[in-house]
Amino acid sequence: MRKVLAALLLLTAVFLFGCIEPKITNVDKKWGAVNNDYSELIVGIDIDNPLPFLPLKDVESSIFVNGIQIASGNAEKISASRITLSIKIDNDRIKDFWISHLANDEKSTILIKAVPVINLFVTEYRYPVEMEQNLETNIFGMDFGDRSIAVAGREIFALKDIKAERGKVTSEYTEILVRGTAINNAPAKVDIEKLEYKITLNDVVVGQGTARISRTLEPGESVELQVPIMIDNSKIPEWWVTHVKNGEKTVAKVSAKLYIKTAGVGYSLDFGETSEFRTHLAD
């Protein structure tokens, strides 16, 4: 009995010191169930286990974005050579993903951790597996170009070099700054009144409203405008479902209408732009 115990202890020591250790031969990922509550990421890990008679007890798994844990899960199936993980992402945590990503200048490190636990007779052996990928986007770096209003063939107002860029990001909202140079080419003053806008992600309306401007330009005057428009971050989980179901692809669209008045007559100027971005959690 003592010889058997000594042999087991020696085998355990050899395993723990890395002389005999399972090797990861392949990792594959795909989406499972996706609904309004959670998104299931299924991760398969093939293992070359030199000691298949030592069973896997469990597999602990989690997903981190910029160090923030957004999901955890357990093994769905375990064999000597194959682990299948079911990692369920609570869709409400996607808002944390969004906020961290944009606040970090649209850059993220996504880390999937899996920790298989092997029974080694008198102890447990854990060997972590990590899958890391970097995500970089430019969702709202949009260039709308130039727009103008003409009356009877004469330009009376122009908005030049219209651009959008990300502004402040909080837990409640994401600010998008619309910038441009407003030029009054009319013989009378121009009142710039407001900007109506709508922001969609895969046709999910994540921001909509009116930004008041109340700026007056004298004839021949130009001014740099900066108008903040807002995304409601509570809409981000709803967008995420469409993103995953669309193959982790999103079309972002900003549509806007600027209202002005000159010589007692009101006019509107329409502009908009789209961009596309992808993630690769299941690639």
Image (cartoon, rainbow, N blue to C red):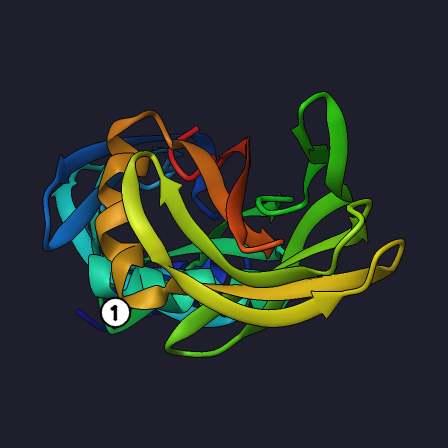
**Looking at the image, which residue sits at the far bottom?**
171
Percent x, y of residue 98: 44, 60
Relative vertical location of residue 246 with respect to residue 63 in this rendering, above or below? above
Q: Is residue 16 left or right of residue 239?
A: right
Closer to the camera in the image, 111 or 70 = 70
Percent x, y of residue 279: 48, 37
At mark 1, the secondary structure is helix
Q: Is residue 233 left or right of residue 34?
A: right
Percent x, y of residue 225: 73, 62
Which residue corresponds to mark 1?
Answer: 5
Q: Quadrant of the N terminus?
A: bottom left
Q: Is residue 54 left or right of residue 271?
A: left
Q: Quadrant of the C terminus?
A: top left
Classify residue 33 by image quadrant.
top left
* Residue drawn at 35 percent across, 66 percent down: 233
Amino acid residing under circle 1: Leu
